Each structure stands twice: as structure tokens, then as C-alpha cells.
Image (cartoon, coloured by chain):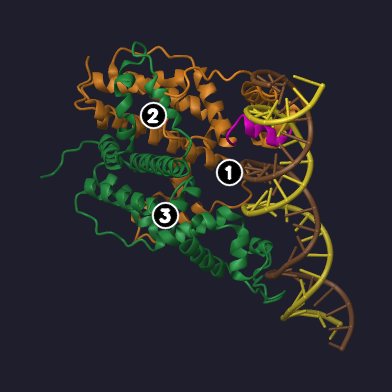
Chain colours: A green, B orange, C yellow, D brown
Amino acid sequence: MPPPVPTRGPTGRPPRTSRTQIMDAARRLIDRDGWQMLTVRRLAAEIGVAPTTLYHHVRDKEDLLRQLLNDYADQIPRARLPRDPHERIITASTVMHDSLAARPWITEVLTADDLVGTSSLWMVEAIVAGAIDSGCTPEQAVVLYRSVWYYTVGEILVRATAAHRRAESSRPVYRDAVLLGLDKSELPHLAALADRWPSLTARDTYQHGLHAIVDGLLPSTVTPS
Amino acid sequence: MPPPVPTRGPTGRPPRTSRTQIMDAARRLIDRDGWQMLTVRRLAAEIGVAPTTLYHHVRDKEDLLRQLLNDYADQIPRARLPRDPHERIITASTVMHDSLAARPWITEVLTADDLVGTSSLWMVEAIVAGAIDSGCTPEQAVVLYRSVWYYTVGEILVRATAAHRRAESSRPVYRDAVLLGLDKSELPHLAALADRWPSLTARDTYQHGLHAIVDGLLPSTVTPS
DNA sequence: GCTACTTTTCGAACATGTTCCTAAATTAGG
DNA sequence: CCTAATTTAGGAACATGTTCGAAAAGTAGC
């Protein structure tokens, strides 16, 4: 082992900037000017420091955003969970989804493996526990959680990006044009649905799919009366 | 109606660059140097043209990648589909997933609403048709397809990014450290699973979750003998 | 052949995230 | 007090995607 007590004494140039200070400024900037305006240079200016200085307290921008997400997740109030395990999974998953969906900038970090904000882990615990209480093995419970996670991430990313594209649209929706010109003999069902496709894909079906995943992955869904 | 035959005669400076030429060069560059090396400047250099010239044939880089994805999807061989509707959905979904997962750069575009490569729509058709043949209403069929799409996109993005992070790792996996230091009374199930979590989340569970979604969204899964 | 018009091409420039190296500011040892 | 070590701060610079405006290269009408 290395020297037992490195306890590096306070030496070196004293920091004028702290990580929490950076996080506060980032939150302030997002709240004030929108998440699009959160750039490294602007953030540095907000603190009154050179852009490169930030890189001594933050690995990169993704690191900053991830920390921001974790802090935000820590503030999500712990929901009251229903007694039924199945409903518990749905509730926790929904809180997870809605919390993420509420902050658009989250899509920038959402490709992480998991949600690991320390005090947001109660959602993961609730889902895994609910699965186990429903008769899942631990392995199956993890599979269920990950399926929910994939589904949730995909839904948020796809919907957020679609909305974003529509916002800065002006360009015609390529997909719609494609769908309307389909060969009815080759793709009969799609051709029949073509005109309704935009409105159908605009609907919020997160809950619907979520229930399907949970139902499909729980051993025997004998809903207790 | 506007003038009947605009057929705008060949006027203006003759193009030295074509969109297909750009696409070919992009594919060549990706095949040769990897998708990370596909930058606008490099692509322009490969063609022997100024970077800004590309923007007359391509809206932006995302547009380029989307076209690339569509072209690639068009080349996916149409799979032989089984007779059972349920199995048809699974097969088409799996082809969709595997085709996307095979090309890492696809994650850059994957947040589109759908997969609209004209000749890759047979997968969407197969899924929707399978759902309808199983007794779904058209609306339910679309919900099923979208759930599969969200789940697939999420899985690919999460796994690709995780792999990417591991590749350029050197930084310790923050998540693992968090999991190992959990409070067993607060999060008993997670604490019990902490040490197995990395290996559990490394497994490929796409098929598992996929079956759950399909089973959960089909009306009555009376599997025919 | 000259002019008007149209389309393509490209150089200059900008904002972004990021790395490298040097300068400052502090403590510890002599 | 001076020097060495150490840590933070910041300037210069780079690669990226992208916009803007001007120059180039054709065609159509006269």
C-alpha cells in the first residue's frame, strides 16, 4: 500500500472556483436563459472566470450535465408507493419518466447506463423490489428494470428530438411525404394508416407500453383483488 | 396552380458535386477510417471541394447521416417472415434492431421519429400487420410498433454509449462506486445486487424485453399449436 | 456579343468544446 | 527570507459544424 496518510495538506494555489459554484451558476443560467444557452464560455463568464478554468473542476461538459442531472434527481420528492407490487413498479417508473421528461436538457446525458443520483435510487429500488415481490428472481427483476429503462430513454429521446425538429422546422416532414406515397400492394397496412400516422404518433402512449413491458415480464400477473 | 411546366431549364452554374457523390464519399470514409473520422472538412477533402460546398447539397450533417441511414436500411435484405403473426413481429423487430446495432454511427441519427428508409418500411409493415393479424385495432398496432421502436432506440443508444464510455474509460465507473456503498436498510434489494449489477447489466436482454412488450400489447396471446 | 439571371463554389468568419502550456498564488523545507 | 513543490488560473490554439456574402460559371433574351 502507498503511504498510509497522504492527507495532502492544503498547499498549492487556493481555488477561486468550486464545483458547487459551477453547478449553481449552470442552474442559474439554464433557468434564466434556457438550456440551449448553457455553453462553457457563457458559464465561465457567468462566474467571472476563464473558460478553461472550469476544466479543473469538471471533466468535460457531459460530466457537468451528468452531475446536474444527479442533483436534480436528488430533489425529486419520494413518491408514496402503492401496496401492490405491480402498481409500485408502474408508479416508480412513471415518476422516473416524468421527472426526466420535464427537463429537456436531460436528453444530452440520458445515454448513461442508469440513473445513479444517489437519492433517486429509490425508484430503481422500488422497481426491482416490486418485481421480486411479484415472484421474479433477482435476475429477472434486473431485466425488467433495464427494459423499462431502455423504453423510457428511447421514448424521451425520440419525442424530445421530434419536438425539437418540429420547433425549428420550416423544412417539410420527410417522413409524411414518404408515407403518403406508399405502394398499397406492397405495404397495405402502412398505406391504409398513412394519413393518420402523424396524429397517431403524436399521442402519448408511454403508459400503454410501460404496462405491457411490466405485465410481460412479471411471472404470473394474478392481480390480487 | 402555378405555371404548368416550370421544368426549369438547365441554367446557373453547372454543379461539380452531386448528392450521391457525397454519399459515396461518406461511405468510403467511414469504411476506411471509421465513423469517428467522418467530419465535414474531411469529407470535403475526400471529394476535393471546399467544406462549405457540401451545404448546397446537404442541409446539415444530420441530414447527411439520415440519408446514409436510409440508404443503408434499403440494403437490408428482406427477411423471410414466419407465418405466425406473433413470431413475425419478433422477427421483423429483431432484424430492425440488429441492423441498427451493427453500425455504431447510427446512434447519431437514431432519434428520428421512425425508420423511413423507403424499402426498409417492410419491417414496420410486418410489425403493424402482425399486430393487426393478431387482433389489434390499427391504433393498437401503431402503439405496439412505437413501443418496440422506443425500446429499440433506447437499448441501442444506452448500450452504444456505455460501450463508448468504457472504451475511452480510464476514468473509474462512477455508478459501480455508488452501488457498492448503498445503505442496506434503505435500498435492500439494490444493495444485495450491487456486486452483480455490472455483470447483469452487461448481458444482452433485448429479446427478453421485446417479447414482453409484444406479449403485453397483443390482445390475447393464445399461441397456436 | 452583351446583359440579366441563376445556380454553384468557396473564402472568411463565428461559436462551440477542448487541450496544452505558461503564469500566478499559495505552503513546506531550509 | 528564499527556494521548491504544488495547485489553480488563464491565454493561445485547434478541430468541429455552420452561416454569410461575394466570386465564378454557366444559360436565355436581345
**Badge 3, how many Cα within 10 Å: few under 14, some, many 20+?**
few
Q: Please identify the quarter of the rendering in which residue B124 is found.
A: top left
Task: Say which residue appears at 42% left-offset and 44% top-offset.
Answer: A160
- What is the three-letter code of the residue carrying label 2? Gln
Task: Say which residue appears at 33% left-offset and 21% top-offset.
Answer: A190
Q: Please identify the quarter of the rendering in which residue B163 is found.
A: top right
Q: Earlier in the sequence, mark 1 or mark 2?
A: 1
Task: Say which residue appears at 25% left-offset and 42% top-offset.
Answer: A135
- In the rendering, at what x and y percent does residue C25 appear? 74, 79
- What is the three-letter code of the residue carrying label 3? Arg
- In the rendering, at what x and y percent does residue B126 appear? 35, 19
Chain at tag 1: B
* Label 3: element kind: loop
Q: Which mark is residue A214?
A: none
| A5 relative to B102 in the view: left or right | right
Q: Residue B183 or A173: which is nearer the viewer?
A: A173
* Label 2: element kind: helix
Q: Residue A139 or A61: which is nearer the viewer?
A: A61
Circle 3 residue: A103
Q: Is residue B68 visible?
A: yes
- What is the three-letter code of the residue carrying label 1? Arg
Q: Which residues are magenta?
A: B50-60
Circle 2 residue: B207
Distance from Cα at disc 3 to Cα at disc 1:
27 Å
Circle 1 residue: B166
